[in-house]
Image (tube, rainbow, N blue to C red):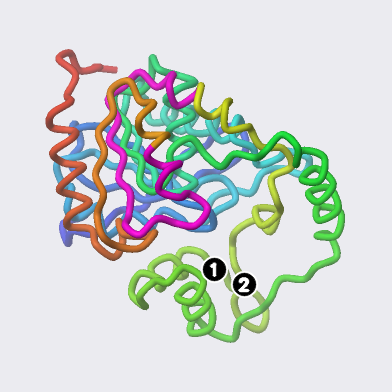
Amino acid sequence: MRPDGTAAEFGCDISIGRIAGLRSGTPGGRRVLALHGWLDNAASFVPLAGRLPQLELVMPDLPGHGRSAHLPHGVEYTAANAIAYVLEIADALGWTRFCLLGHSMGAGIASLAAAAAPERIEALVAIEALGGLAENAGNTASRLRQAIAQRRALAGKALRVFPDLAMPVRARMLANHLDEDCARLLVERGIRPVEGGLVWSSDPRLTLPTSIRMTEAQIDDLVAAIECPTQVIYADPPQTYFPEALRRHRASLLAHGELAVIPGGHHLHMEMPEPVAAVIARFLAAHREPVRDLL
């Protein structure tokens, strides 16, 4: 955290290229890697960062998002790859064990990483997702056909050029039901200049449908395999793709899970950071490991 209270720029190199991001808090504090949602970026956690100064908080732009490198041609955006990149970022930081904080897609990645690498994760905070989106087995072929067709069609599409920030800010406000200040935070880190104006900096391949998704049974198995203390935070009302019955079911599978429901929208960690930060601070204070990793 800079003296003026703002997050500082962060960067590291991993196997696919440069990872950018933000860093805030107290060096030597509880190590927390914060993973943002789909088509968001590190600025997603800026409203929370100033309310959690006791943490050593690193907020990367995930590959293909914000100011980070896009995946090389031929490398797909998959959950398994995302887990690997998260661990590579932690390696670059010199963090052997650390906490994960995720929102939406980032919470899905974080929860799967906790299941896949329990020896690395001290604690998990999952906001508005747990385990990722599932698919019925009977839709496997149709999903794969759609994904391949859209991937082949993407090559011929040009990026939309905006004359100024006003239009993309308005687009984010409408798409995500965000207030202007929150939308502007995301947009300012999520655009790049080109001749004639601005374009989204995110990899266009991120808009393609996932070619293959796990079934609900597979996701249940992974969520049940999370060993670390886990705080789930849901907004009320729930998102249509993650209905109440499903999200309660997922949370019930956790071996060491706690659940908080806070009135608000999907980006409640941005628009209502005070109650979200209070839940996170209480949870992490209550679940500190007795022996701190010194590496």
Mark found first going from the N terminus, 1 or 2:
1
| Foreground of the two, 249 or 118 | 249
- Give the residue number, with chain letter if any, for mark 1: 191
For residue 199, the mark is 2
- Tell me residue 35's x, y (percent): 42, 44
Q: Left of 169 or right of it: where is 148?
A: right
Residue kind at label 1, given as amino acid type: Ile
- Tell me residue 136's x, y (percent): 67, 38
| Foreground of the two, 41 or 147 | 147
Dot 2 falls on a residue whose secondary structure is: strand
The answer to which quarter of the image holds residue 95 is: top left
Q: Left of 273 or right of it: where is 221?
A: right
Does residue 192 show up magenta in the picture?
Answer: no
Total label count?
2
Does residue 71 lie above or below 205 as drawn? Answer: above
Does residue 224 show up magenta in the picture?
Answer: yes
The segment highlighted magenta reads 222-248
Residue depicted at 64% across the width and 74% down the height: 194
Visible residue check, residue 78: yes
- Tell me residue 181's x, y (percent): 33, 74
Looking at this view, name the residue that lies furthest to the front.
Answer: 245
Visible residue check, residue 1: no
